[in-house]
Every structure is written in structure tokens, then in C-alpha cells.
């Protein structure tokens, strides 16, 4: 029998209306970690003050078989010129994954990129092989964790009560964004996040986020202001932690936890995470996930002591051009 020659890939510029298809592609590849189509469409619809995006629907013949994307921060704010390559193909078409990566690399390089970054889950040998075949090298490991809220319910609620008592003794108030009446609270939370973001281990230089972009995140479909926890010390916001709740499908997970340098070591991060988890338990959530750079020792230790267990993470890869 003659072998079947796969048709070449074609790339059509994507619109926000294509986000649901991209979410379906990723869900087909990782059914235990579904992607939410509503949240993805929201993000595909947003502008950005710094980031440049190019997104595509990938076709083989007449069939859409995947999505592709490259993005980068404007070169005037990121002179190192890193660009990130994303996207994948439905299982039956993944033999062409190398061609997808090659196309996005070519386009990113044509836009001026000097260093390319991509990612693969630890348990995805097909993608890892395609990435290594394109000359990438391993860079940073991103740990992922899952916490069973049913099995750990009592210990988490007891930990929450202890943390509340400690915060009371420390003079730190815990409340949700919805309950905060400070007209400048978003600005204060954004400034805190910028400070904390600079302390996260990274290879690719961190690009500052505009406050307008941060504000759009607080309005995303997966974010609820009455589930967005902040810590206050007097007039200052000194910590935050928020779980994202996918509106259609997916697993509830930590979007971001941060504390001001001035309060680190005082249990603020634990107290905030406890509040998010106690609230999730009350809402009937059975498990949550989180992720962290493998070199972020303080948050890794916190996850372990709260009962999280490791699940397959992801490796970042780099390639110079």
C-alpha cells in the first residue's frame, strides 16, 4: 500500500471568533486540563499596551487542524528581543508539529526576534521531540501542583483559622476586592504585583505590565472580585491571591499570589491562599491547581505544607537565531 503524503500546513490569520476552536484543540490534547473557550476569547479580544500578537488558524487541505501564535514585547521595551512560539495541532495531525514551529519561527524572526521561546508539558513526548528537533535547549522547569479540597478540607479550614488569628495579631486585614472601598485599590494592587513580579525567577527579562492591562485582567470572565483576596496594612495593599474560575470548562486554579517585600516572612501569603481555598471549599470546588517556577523556593515550600501534590509540569525551551 502506498504511503499517504500529509498535506502541507496553511495559516490563516485568526480572530477572536476562532478562540473557541483553539480551546477545543488544546482540550483534545490535554483532556485532564481543559481550556475554557470564553476566557480565551476574552483575551484574544483585548488590546495590549506592550505585547504584540500574531495568531493563526492552521489548516491541512480544507480542514482546520490547529492554531498557532507568536508574541513578543515591543522591542523598545525589551531590547533582548525574545519572542514566544505557541500553538499545536489536533492529535491526528501532530506529525506536522515541526512545520508549525518552523512557520512561527520564520515569522517571528522576520519581525526582528533574536531569541525564541516555546514550551512543552513534561508528559508530551511528541511535542518535546518536535521542539528539540528544531534546535531548542531546555531552559526553566515550571512546576504544577494539585490540591484535593475534599481530602484536605479539615486541615485547610483549621489552617485558615490559625492564619486569620495570626493576621489579626499582625494588624493585617484580609478582605476581597469587592469589599474594598478605596478608589485607588486597583492601582495599589497593580503596583504590588509589579514589585512582586520582579522577584519571580526568570530567564526571559520581565516586561512591566501597564495598569490598564492589569485592570483588564481583574475584569476577565474567570476572575471574580468577590473571590479576589487582598491583604491590607493600614492604607497599603501588602498582598493578594486569587483563584481563576473557568466559566465553561476547566479546573479552578491560582492566577496569582503576591506579597510586598515589607511583609514577607509574616505568613501573609499563606493567609491569603487559605482564604481563597476556604472560599472554594464553601463553593463546592473539589480541587484546585497552581503553578510556579521550579526555582521559586518559598512558594514551593508553601505549596508542600498546604497539601498540594505535584502533577506533570512544563519545560520552557530557548533557541537563539
Image: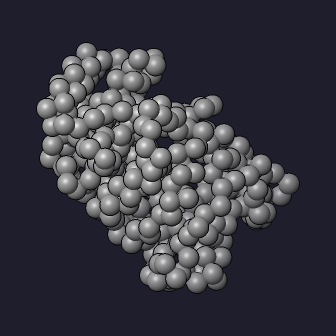
Give the vertical position of 85 relative to 255 (above or below). below
Q: Indicate left or right for 47 with 148 as reference.
A: right
Up the image or down, 320 lies above or below 120; here it is below
Task: State the image coordinates of residue 286 (x, y, percent, origin top left).
Answer: 42, 21
Point 46% across, 83% down: residue? 79
Q: Is residue 181 visible?
A: yes
Any part of residue 133 in sight = no
Please name the colour scheme applied to the rendered image. Answer: one colour
Rendered location of residue 170, percent (x, y)? 15, 37
Drawn side of residue 11 relative to residue 144, left or right = right
User: Where is residue 222, by image quadrant?
Assistant: top right
Q: Tag count in the figure?
A: 0
**Nearer to me, 73 or 176:** 176
Q: Position of residue 65 (x, y in %)?
A: 73, 51
Instruction: Kindly indicate the quadrant of the structure image that contains residue 3.
Output: bottom right
Q: Residue at x 19, y 49 (%)?
A: 263
Apparent side of residue 36 relative to residue 144 in the rendered image (left or right):
right
Which residue: 26% across, 19% down?
A: 157
Name the residue furthest right: 62
The one of 291 and 209 positioned closer to us in this rendering = 209
Horizontal side, residue 311 vs residue 74: left or right = left
List x then y, in percent, for residue 274: 29, 30
Q: Residue at x 44, y 38 (%)?
A: 181
| Vertical placement of residue 28 versus 295, above or below | above
Tell which of 215 and 171 is nearer to you: 171
Is 65 or 290 nearer to us in this picture?
290
Amino acid at each position: 500500500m502506498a504511503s499517504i503524503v500529509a498535506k502541507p500546513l496553511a495559516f490563516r490569520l485568526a480572530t477572536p471568533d476562532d478562540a473557541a476552536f483553539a480551546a477545543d484543540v488544546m482540550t483534545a490534547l490535554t483532556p485532564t486540563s481543559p481550556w475554557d473557550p470564553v476566557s480565551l476569547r476574552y483575551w484574544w479580544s483585548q488590546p495590549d499596551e506592550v505585547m504584540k500578537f500574531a495568531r493563526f488558524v492552521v489548516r491541512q487541505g480544507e480542514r482546520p487542524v490547529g492554531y498557532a501564535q507568536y508574541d513578543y514585547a515591543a522591542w523598545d521595551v525589551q531590547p533582548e528581543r525574545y519572542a514566544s512560539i505557541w500553538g499545536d495541532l489536533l492529535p491526528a495531525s501532530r506529525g506536522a508539529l515541526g512545520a508549525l514551529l518552523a512557520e512561527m519561527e520564520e515569522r517571528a524572526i522576520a519581525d526582528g526576534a533574536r531569541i525564541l521561546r516555546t514550551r512543552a508539558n513534561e508528559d508530551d513526548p511528541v511535542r518535546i521531540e518536535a521542539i528539540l528537533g528544531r534546535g531548542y535547549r531546555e531552559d526553566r522547569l515550571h512546576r504544577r501542583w494539585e490540591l484535593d479540597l475534599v481530602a484536605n478540607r479539615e486541615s485547610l479550614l483549621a489552617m485558615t483559622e490559625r492564619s486569620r488569628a495570626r493576621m489579626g495579631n499582625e494588624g493585617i486585614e484580609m478582605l476581597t476586592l469587592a469589599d474594598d472601598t478605596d478608589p485607588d485599590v486597583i492601582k495599589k494592587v497593580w503596583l504590588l504585583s509589579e514589585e512582586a513580579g520582579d522577584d519571580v525567577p526568570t530567564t526571559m527579562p520581565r516586561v512591566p505590565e501597564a495598569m490598564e492591562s492589569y485592570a483588564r485582567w481583574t475584569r476577565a470572565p474567570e476572575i471574580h472580585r468577590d473571590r479576589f483576596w487582598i491583604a491590607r496594612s493600614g492604607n497599603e495593599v501588602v498582598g493578594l491571591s486569587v483563584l481563576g474560575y473557568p466559566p465553561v470548562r476547566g479546573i479552578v486554579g491560582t492566577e496569582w499570589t503576591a506579597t510586598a517585600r515589607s511583609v514577607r516572612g509574616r505568613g501573609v501569603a499563606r493567609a491569603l491562599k487559605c482564604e481563597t481555598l476556604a472560599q472554594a471549599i464553601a463553593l463546592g470546588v473539589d480541587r484546585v491547581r497552581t503553578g510556579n517556577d521550579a526555582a521559586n523556593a518559598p512558594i514551593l515550600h508553601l505549596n508542600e505544607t498546604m497539601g498540594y501534590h505535584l502533577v506533570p509540569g512544563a519545560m520552557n525551551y530557548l533557541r537563539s537565531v
